[in-house]
Image (tube, rainbow, N blue to C red):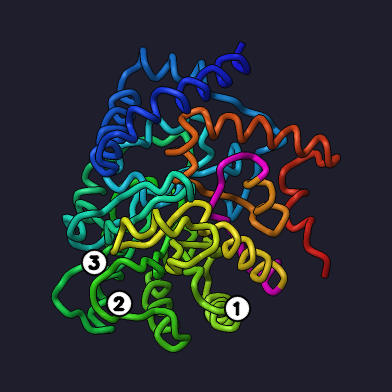
Amino acid sequence: MQKFFLKLDAWIYRNFIKKFLFLFDAEFVHDFIVGFGGSVGGSGLLGGLMRKCFYVRNRKLTQVIVGINFENPVGLGAGFDYQAKLTKVLPFLSFGFQTIGTITNHPYAGNPRPRLGRLPKSKSLMVNKGFKNPGIKEIVKKLQKKEFKIPVGISIGKTNTTKQMSQLEAVEDIVSAFKIAECSRVNFGFYELNISCPNLFGDVDFYSPEKLKELLSAVTNLKLKKPLFVKMPIEKTNEEVLKMLQVIADFPIAGVIIGNLQKNRKDKALNAEEVKKFPVGNFSGKATEQRSNELIELAYRKYEKKMVIIGCGGIFNAKDAYKKIKLGASLVQLVTGLIFEGPQLVTQINIDLVNLLKKDGFINISEAIGQDIVF
């Protein structure tokens, strides 16, 4: 019955709901959907109905990673729920974990419009929000004493401001946000340190080894109680990324998230005519997939035993997710695929992942990690 419903839901979403929603401004629709999802999560009746339709669980997908129990490897990436409204509804959609944010020390209303746009032919989104969020104090206030059914992490980054911020001020700003999160009574499962957003003002840089080391030293000196992941850029060369990974490996950091938005407007996955519609911003979805996969493989080859890799970028089905896992990712995150494919996507990915594991003879998803890598 669930299999039939998922196919029906996908067909209705692709042929009717998505076409209707795509008639309206992308950011308006995003805000509406997030608000609606928050309402569903707060409703026992609607939440129960959604759970019955979308929730799946299979022991083949369960893992314990850095001390955290994950029912499945598919999470919601940062950039979607930056108001912490979806913590109750996402478990009903079969997400294995989620990241709130990116959240900053001070609130930010967002970059000048347009902040969000669609590139349907490219299966991509133009993103120019620039860490739009209500600030860390508001987020922890909203989440105080709440219980989470799946691991909920928080992505923290530098406050975006048109006022020039020095390197030292940027580090202090990030550390202040971590202190507030750490001292709160919110049961975060993990932290993400987002050093890779390309839509920020100023010239603060955390990519060079020396400056990255300064930031990581300041953050890890807080002796955080939860595992910390670093969100990586994808536009850097292999040599630059390896230098960053070497710095990260020298600190008590759980792993890395690979990676963030595509800055190359001439990337072959992007339709040139669609790109011309957006003079600002950078791109998510399929435009990030190839480079994300290349860097996952690079990181796994070099640091297989030293850090956990979370793969992010261009996941629209189970094969996309499985490819990242077999290249070395222990977990995966998505955002854009959900918008283009519909709310049934994560459920379908999890069902299909089980079938892919059976086909390859794996008992558990952990056995597939890095299996496409020949050392």
Q: Residue at x 33, y 52 (%)?
A: 101
Q: Which residue is mark 1?
A: 238
Q: Which mark is residue 159?
A: 3
Kind of residue sitting beneath label 2: Val
Label pair 1/3, CB-CB below 8 angstroms:
no
Residue count near mark 3 (Cα–Cα under 10 Å), binned few <14, some 14–19, many ≥20: many
Kind of residue sitting beneath label 3: Thr
Label pair 3/2, CB-CB below 8 angstroms:
no
Q: Secondary structure at mark 2?
A: helix
Q: Which residue is mark 2?
A: 171
Query: Disc 3 or disc 2, which is closer to the eye?
Result: 3
Q: Examine the image and state in which quarter residue 206 appears.
A: bottom left
Position of the N terminus by quadrant = top right
Q: Which residues are magenta?
A: 302-319
Q: Secondary structure at mark 1?
A: helix
User: Is any atom of residue 323 visible in this view?
Assistant: yes
Q: Earlier in the sequence, mark 3 or mark 2?
A: 3
Kind of residue sitting beneath label 1: Asn
Q: Which mark is residue 139?
A: none
**Residue 333 part of the magenta-drawn span:** no
- Residue 217, image x, y percentages: 42, 79
Q: Secondary structure at mark 3?
A: loop
In the displayed structure, would residue 118 be above or below residue 87? below
